[in-house]
């Protein structure tokens, strides 16, 4: 299995809703990432988990709450989002998270989020 | 600080013609360089990477890239483009220990393939 699976593919939510995005990989990777991508822009890093511990938070607003229940799963909990949070949310994984930067990321297909 | 520049926002190429996408990086030491491709509504797929060794690297889908340290470039090439190559292409650099291995992406180049 060489895939990163993200669910749901599409999500529409109101500003008062609570929802979650899910990400799963079975490649034995120990680093997992959340990226946000706006249209016509490169992905922006949000969070990195390494060995199930949060190692990077790129000053993301608290309305986004990541969770890594085990080495195969990564969740992104969403609460009280704003319309400007509408974007494609990409999950990725890598075998490890090397400080050297030699990390080969495998990306999921993304969850398209629309906040009304 | 490391940075990546993709000078071409948009490229149109005829099917069967050759393609070259430019990427310039700024980084003090030897960087780790990547090219990713993103089809519409999809995630990113790794085309190829350069860590060390032979400066001409081969990737998937018939793509290759050449690392030129003197020009701080890592340009992507394909000899004959297929309609399925229409996509967004991102160059990325990693390797700055101060940034804890984070990838720095270029702005991307949109490739349109005409019949």
Image (cartoon, coloured by chain):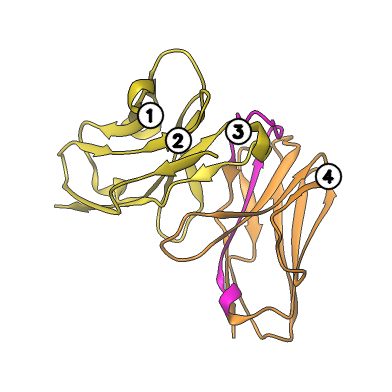
Q: Are marks 3 and 4 in contact (CB under 8 Å)?
A: no
Q: Residues within 10 Å of mark 4 (few under 14, many from 20)?
A: some
Residue A94 seen: no
Identify the element where label 3 is drawn. loop
Secondary structure beneath dot 1 equals loop
Q: Secondary structure at mark 4?
A: loop
Give me the residue at 60% from left, 29% from top.
A102
Name the residue tied to disc 2. Answer: B26
**Crowd band around label 3 with a 10 angstrom C-alpha radius: few (<14), some (14–19), many (20+):** many
- The disc, 1 or 3, on the residue closer to the chain's N-terminal end is 1
- Judged by depth in the image, the label closer to the viewer, 3 or 4, is 3
The chain ID associated with circle 2 is B
Secondary structure category for the residue under label 2? strand
Label 2 packing within 10 angstroms: few (<14), some (14-19), many (20+): some
Labelled pair 1, 3 in contact (Cβ < 8 Å): no
Depth check, mark 1 against mark 4: the one in front is 1
Q: Position of residue A19 (x, y in %)?
A: 74, 74
Above/below status of A27 relative to A75: above
**Chain designation of label 3:** B
Residue stretch rendered in magenta on the structure: A84-105
Chain B is which colour? yellow
Q: In the picture, which quadrant includes the C terminus of chain A?
A: bottom right
CA gap, disc 1 to disc 3? 15 Å
Q: Position of residue B108 (x, y in %)?
A: 39, 50
């Amino acid at each position: 299995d060489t895939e990163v699976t993200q669910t749901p593919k599409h999500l529409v939510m109101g500003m008062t809703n609570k929802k979650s995005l899910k990400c799963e990989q079975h490649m034995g990777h120990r680093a997992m990432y959340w990226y946000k991508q706006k249209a016509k822009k490169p992905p922006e890093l949000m969070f990195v988990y390494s060995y199930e511990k949060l190692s990077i938070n790129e000053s993301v607003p608290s309305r986004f709450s990541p969770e890594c229940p085990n080495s195969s799963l990564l969740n992104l909990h969403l609460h009280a989002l704003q319309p400007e949070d509408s974007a494609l949310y990409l999950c990725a994984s890598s075998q490890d998270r090397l400080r050297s930067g030699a990390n080969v990321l495998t990306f999921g297909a993304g969850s398209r989020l629309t906040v009304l | 600080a490391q940075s990546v520049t993709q000078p071409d926002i948009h490229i149109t190429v005829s099917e069967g013609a050759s393609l070259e996408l430019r990427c310039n990086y700024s980084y003090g030491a030897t960087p780790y360089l990547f090219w990713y491709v993103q089809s519409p509504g999809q995630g990113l797929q790794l085309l190829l990477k350069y860590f060390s060794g032979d400066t001409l690297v081969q990737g998937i889908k018939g793509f290759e890239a050449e690392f030129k340290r003197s020009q701080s470039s890592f340009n992507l090439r394909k000899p004959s483009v297929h309609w399925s190559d229409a996509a967004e292409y991102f160059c990325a650099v990693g390797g700055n220990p101060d940034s804890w291995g984070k990838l720095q992406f270029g702005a991307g180049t949109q490739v349109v393939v005409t019949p």
